[in-house]
Amino acid sequence: MNAQSAADHFASLAAPRLASLLRLSSARHIYEPVAGALNSTVIEAGVPVVLDRWKRGIQPYKDLERFAGDDRVMQSVIDPGLLPIAKAISRDVVGRRILITRRIAAKETDQGAIAQVPGCGIRILIYPDSGDTIVAWECLYGVA
C-alpha cells in the first residue's frame, strides 16, 4: 500500500467514525466543500461565521504498514487522529447552534499524500520525516 492509497483508505474510514464520536444533538453541522483557509468566513442563514478554529494532530509511525491492516487501523491510526479533533469540536460546540467545517485549501508547504475526509472538513497528510512516516490530521471549523 502506497502513501496515497493509505491516506484515501484512512479518510474513508474516518468519516463514519467522526460522526459517531461527535453525536451533535443541539448543533447543526454544515460542510462547506469550497476550499478555504484559517479565518475565512461563511455566511449561514444571514449570519457570518468565521472559521477561526484549527486543530492539528501528528502521529509518527516507524512502520505504518503494520497498523494499516483491518484489525488494527481503527485503534492505532484512526482513533488517535480523530479523538483530539472530536474532543475539541465537542467542547467548542457546547451551547452553539451551528458547526461549520470547510475543505482545507492546499498550501505550498504541503508534502506527501493528501486525502480529504468526505463531508467533514478534515484532511489527512502522510509524509516521511527522519525515518518515520508522519500521519497528520488537520481540521478547519467555526461555530456560531
Image: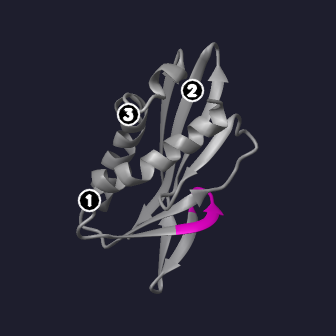
Q: Quadrant of residue 94?
A: bottom left
* Residue 130 drawn at (x, y percent): 64, 14
The residue to which callout 1 is attached is: 23
The residue to which callout 2 is attached is: 134
Q: Residues within 10 Å of mark 1 (few under 14, many from 20)?
A: few
Distance between the Cα atoms at labels 2 and 3? 13 Å
Q: Quadrant of the C terminus?
A: bottom left
Please say if 12 is above or below 125: below
The residue under the point 57% across, 51% down is 116
Q: Is residue 130 left or right of residue 135?
A: right
* Residue 68 drawn at (x, y percent): 48, 29
Asked whether the beta carbons under mark 1 and mark 3 sit within 8 Å of each other, the answer is no
Residue range in magenta is: 32-39
Q: Decide if residue 102 is in sight here.
A: yes
Three-letter amino acid code of the residue under disc 1: Arg
* Residue 87 drawn at (x, y percent): 31, 46
